[in-house]
Amino acid sequence: MRRVEADRRAIMSAFFAQVAKSTTGSSENPRPVYEHFSDLFDEQAEIDRVRGAYEPNYKPTSRRAKEQDINRIIAERYKRYEELKKQGKLPTKRAREKGGK
């Protein structure tokens, strides 16, 4: 956790230096590259990464981790669906229309 805090401080320092210098867009309409500190550093994702490495039953709480978990579940379900489809264990469209299997 100390490491995450140290990284956060270093990146926050870099963020403020970048905000002062870096822009994107035309010279007439410059915009900062990173509008929010969270665009540069996701502190909760870093905490999740560190705690996940040392705590075997830790569940990530960052939004990115939750989205990755949802995507993993969808991919697993789709894979299972394809397996059942190959094995012929799913009803066909014609059978569903007739009300049978």
Image (tube, rainbow, N blue to C red):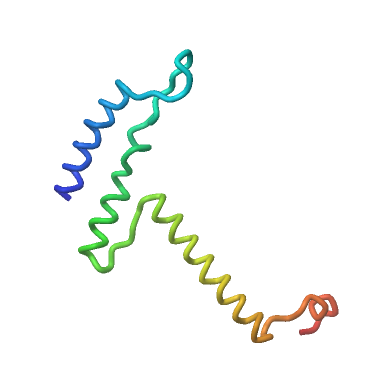
From the viewer's side, name the closer residue of 7 and 2: 7
View extreme (right): residue: 98
Q: Position of residue 64 (x, y in %)?
A: 41, 51
Farthest top residue in view: 28
Choose between 85 and 95: the one closer to the eye.
85
Residue situated in front as seen by the camera: 59 or 43? 43
Does residue 86 lie above or below 76 as drawn? below
Residue 98 location (% of width, % of height):
85, 79
What residue is drawn where x is 28% and y is 56%?
Answer: 49
Residue 32 appears at what percent x and percent y? 39, 25
Where is 90 relative to 64, above or below? Answer: below
Q: Quadrant of residue 84?
A: bottom right
The x, y position of residue 74, in whole percent, is 53, 65
Q: What residue is shown at x 14% (from left), y 47% (from top)? A: 2
Count of marks placed on residues: 0
Vertical arrangement, residue 96 with respect to residue 39, above or below: below
From the viewer's perspective, is 39 left or right of 9?
right
Q: Is residue 88 left or right of residue 25?
A: right
Residue 17 sits in quarter = top left
Residue in the picture at 30% in, 21% down: 20
Q: Residue furthest front?
A: 27
Q: Quadrant of the C terminus?
A: bottom right
Q: Nearer the viewer, residue 14 or 93?
A: 14
For the point 28% across and 63% down, the residue is 58
